[in-house]
């Protein structure tokens, strides 16, 4: 298998169904017919071994992951993904490994109707960069800057499971707790939910670096704060059972790799939002706090909650 | 300097002047107002140390290079670059190094009115991936598939100088031959020429892997061949003086890193093409051969010319 064959094999595995693609992958660049009624959204996110995932995890997960993190960013903008470009770099090419990578990438691409329009293959470090383009209806995007004091802070899904799965992988506890390991290996970006949430949300972000850190990106952009009750954080009951409540809360606050959506909803829209979203999806939607005037405040019920010291490394790395 | 500061510093160095950018860099994704009269062109190309450039070359050149190779692809489509996304990965952050990288990247971005709309910074291997988006007027793009038998093969600029520059750098001959070293360190993508050439060309590609290899990508897509007289290849007289005619021709055929445009022009358009292009640019335009029915034929005047054996490694790597 040569470098060029990797892109051909990927191309063959992905339904290249979009009529908007005038020149597909395989030339100096791709050409797309634009849609004047929509705005173009672009995301760029890369992963590399030892930084974003431990050495030796299955190739299918790596192929899935490099696309999933971009789909999650796209969802956090309230946009629909359309076209992906992939930079694929590996020090040597093992055909079986590449085939598994392609399965992981193309399954997720096909589930989301994403075409591959560009690719570059390199015999270099283990490194995968994706740039993803998508559409949003005029003015319907959600960025991080419009939340107001009093807006409710909501989460999709569960927090902390992926971080615990990563811990299990690193400690080689791979036979237990398949559920958590899968949460790390195969994050499910909230692509469908993001588009509907955008109808109601005032700000949105996806949780990649950890709930506390990522929520801080919204509040600091606004010069606002937040108040969150850590006892309301959506944590799998299993995770508390297998660790402890303290540890589970810490994983949920700071673990990262969740790829769930965190968003703010004006109180007056809450009922309509919950009605539409819960009728459309089985996904869990949990209110975990509120945007406040100035302070970042964590509570555990009626008492203040202090983050463990180690957490603050997230802000300086 | 933290990872996030790199993107901020880049952002500050680049004129973010485009009114089409609705949400700039700094959110989960960027948002752009599309233009219904144009088609969207996307290129993706990455570079990494030891593969694309030798360890230790100046940071300004690396910043320049990762954008230049994408601008060259964009030019080879006949399109105008508009928006870039950068994945910046380095094992450690040296402020001076990063500042120089930013100068190289942003100077070239500003010269070409390119906005930075996305970025990801990683403490990982030395690796830089750029995805570039641009526009072409409806149907005015040039890909690799429309050359016909008899079309003339043209080149911009000179071939072989960058490859010789790379040789000098590797052999530490950095005091001599500044001209060739600069050709390698600071390739000048033919961004303005590409757009005008597109009015006349039937196919176009940029020369990154080497003239012989890249021209073969055009002819093999067409199931055609080409006939090229190596004595007509545009080679700097200096290069022949400093090496030998044989070596200079070999560098020109197989060296790569030229980032010049190779394109085909129907014979009947040649005069008009030359008139418009030479009145508009000081750039050298050289006819080096013709598209033929089936064989790839190199001549040296009236005699056949055989590629040195080593050349064929290009096709198997």
Image: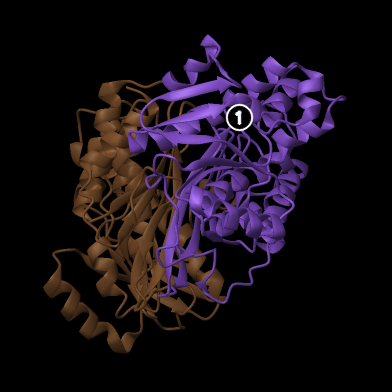
Chain colours: A brown, B purple
Q: Return the chain for callout 1.
A: B
**Left or right: B58 with respect to B141?**
right
Looking at the picture, how far across and down is residue B164, in whole percent? 71, 24
**Left or right: A172 with respect to B231?**
left
Q: Which of A206 and B182 is in front in this view?
A: B182
Snapshot quadrant of residue A261: bottom left
Residue at 30% across, 35% down: A8
Q: Which of B100 and B182 is in front in this view?
A: B182
Looking at the picture, how far across and down is residue B185, in whole percent? 72, 36
Answer above or below: position of A313 versus B8. above
**Left or right: B19 with respect to B141?**
right
Q: Is residue B261 visible to the viewer in this orientation of the structure?
A: yes
Q: In which quarter of the image is the C terminus of chain B?
A: top left
Report the residue marked by disc 1. Answer: B49
Snapshot quadrant of residue A60: top left
**Number of numbered discs present?**
1
Q: Is residue A305 visible to the viewer in this orientation of the structure?
A: no
**Left or right: B102 with respect to B306?**
right
Looking at the picture, how far across and down is residue A50, in whole percent? 46, 32
Q: Is mark 1 on a helix, strand or loop?
A: loop
Looking at the picture, how far across and down is residue A19, in whole percent? 24, 61
Residue furthest to the top in view is B309
Q: Nearer the viewer, residue B131 or A267?
A: B131
Local crowd at mark 1 within 10 Å, few (<14), some, or many (≥20)?
some
Answer above or below: position of A34 versus B172. below
Residue furthest to the right in view is B175
Residue furthest to the bottom in view is A268
Answer above or below: position of A299 versus B131. below
């Amino acid at each position: 298998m040569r470098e060029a064959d990797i892109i051909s094999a990927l191309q063959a595995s992905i339904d290249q169904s979009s009529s908007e693609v005038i020149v597909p992958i395989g030339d100096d660049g791709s050409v797309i017919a634009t849609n004047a009624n929509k705005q173009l959204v672009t995301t760029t996110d890369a992963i590399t071994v030892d930084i974003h995932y431990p050495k030796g995890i299955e190739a299918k997960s790596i192929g899935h992951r490099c696309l999933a993190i971009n789909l999650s960013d796209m969802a956090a903008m309230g946009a629909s993904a359309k076209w992906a470009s992939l930079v694929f770099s590996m020090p040597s090419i093992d055909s079986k490994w590449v085939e598994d990578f392609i399965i992981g990438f193309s399954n997720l691409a096909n589930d989301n109707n994403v075409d591959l329009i560009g690719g570059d293959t390199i015999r270099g470090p283990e490194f995968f960069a994706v740039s993803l383009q998508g559409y949003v209806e005029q003015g319907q995007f959600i960025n991080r800057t419009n939340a107001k004091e009093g807006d409710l802070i909501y989460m999709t899904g569960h927090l902390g499971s992926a971080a615990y799965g990563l811990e299990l992988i690193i400690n080689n506890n791979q036979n237990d707790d398949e559920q958590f390991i899968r949460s790390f290996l195969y994050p499910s970006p909230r692509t469908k939910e993001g588009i509907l949430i955008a109808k109601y949300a005032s700000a949105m972000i996806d949780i990649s670096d950890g709930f506390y850190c990522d929520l801080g990106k919204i509040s600091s952009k606004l010069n606002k704060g937040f108040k969150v009750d850590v006892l309301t954080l959506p944590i799998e009951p299993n995770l508390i059972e297998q660790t402890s409540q303290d540890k589970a809360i810490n994983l949920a606050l700071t673990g990262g790799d969740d790829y769930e959506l965190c968003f703010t909803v004006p109180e007056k829209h809450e009922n309509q939002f919950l009605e539409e979203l819960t009728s459309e999806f089985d996904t869990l939607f949990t209110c975990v706090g509120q945007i406040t005037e100035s302070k970042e405040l964590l509570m555990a019920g009626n008492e203040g909650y202090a983050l463990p010291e180690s957490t603050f490394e997230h802000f300086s790395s």
